Amino acid sequence: MRHKGHKGQMTTHLFGRNKQSTLVKASQSERVDICSRLKRSVMAMQRESKPVPVAVIMITLNEAHNIDAVLENLKGWAQEVYVVDSLSNDGTVEIARKRGAHVVQHLFNGFGDQWNFALRALPISAPWTMKLDPDERLGDDLKSSIRDAIESGGADGIIIRRRLWFMGRPLPIRQSVLRLWRTGLCKFTDVLVNEHPIVEGRLIVVQGDLEHLESLTLHHWLEKQNRYTTAEAATLYKGLPLAERPNLFGTSLQKRMWLKAHFYKLPMRYFLLFLYLFWVEGAWRGGRAGYAWARLRTEVYRTIEFKVLEMKLLGHAYEGPQNASVSDGAGQ
């Protein structure tokens, strides 16, 4: 009995040692896992602390109300920041230089011309270039997605989603816009307004939102649309070429240009446009602000038609004050 009892004690002792050994192994495994996670966290922090190899370019004219905030948004993220200013007189240049941006001033002769000047004249050293408007802000998810896309390679251009804001509220409307490309691969359509980057190569879409804080107030928004509609009306009156050759069965840009060329021939065009903006684009999900946006966007196109009519009656085109803040967002 004692022998059996001793054997039972030995067995229990062995089981205890095995259990302790298992616990030690589990403890070691947990320590390795914790160290591995800490190492990954440190590497991620080091990675995020380095600027993304991107040169961000903005075109400005009297953007003192936006320039400080957008440069703060880019702080520590972009390798280079350039401001091509169209002879501002409101402190835009002073704020940009104080923030460390590289500022060049150039007389504004149209958006296509100004962007092509920027790509041609700026001393860009970053391997990637980004187009940004002063009233746009990059979300954290978008910043990370851009970094990942650049590091993974394989793309020549990057398309991002831009979320519209109106009356101080985000709208449930997102537009896909080509905004980044490998330096040297892009040129812009040579148009007065609604310029488009042309990039040859493989394009990819990344996650995250570019917030388009288009105007501080409705008063400011209407001022911008007044300038935009004048520029568009002058383009139509003079018969100037569109950003791309219209083609219903061509590229996305060519399809848009086809619709633009034929829009004013459509019956019930403003009713159909409102239905498209409100129901198809989803402005209805934005409540009263969404309804107001859809109605006013429809009136923008009607105003262009009336201004073209006025120019025909006058026998000449006219121009509003030049303003580089009327970007490609005004006519989207």
Image: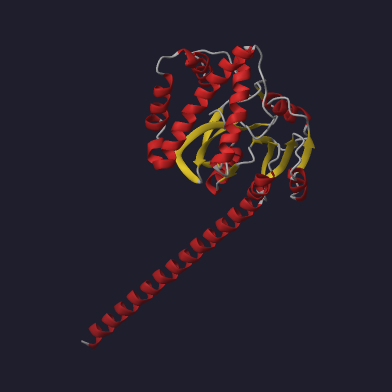
Residue 175 position in % (x across, y down): 50, 33
Q: Write the residue at 50% across / 43% down.
A: 167
- Side of 306 where 59 appears, left or right: right
Occupied quadrant, residue 240 = top right
Looking at this view, name the residue that lies furthest to the left: 1
Tell me how the rendering is colored.
Answer: secondary structure
Occupied quadrant, residue 55 = top right
Above/below status of 306 relative to 326: above
Residue 267 position in % (x across, y down): 41, 14
Above/below status of 97 relative to 299: below
Count of residue discs? 0
Judge by depth and name the residue closer to the eye, 307 or 166. Answer: 307
- Side of 202 where 3 appears, left or right: left
Residue 210 position in % (x across, y down): 55, 41
Q: Write the residue at 33% across / 74% down.
A: 15
Can residue 200 be seen at all in this image of the molecule?
A: no
Can residue 307 be seen at all in this image of the molecule?
A: yes
Above/below status of 50 relative to 245: below
Judge by depth and name the residue closer to the eye, 116 or 314. Answer: 314
Judge by depth and name the residue closer to the eye, 270 or 206. Answer: 270
Residue 168 position in % (x across, y down): 51, 46
Looking at this view, name the residue that lies furthest to the front: 314
Which quadrant: the N terminus? bottom left
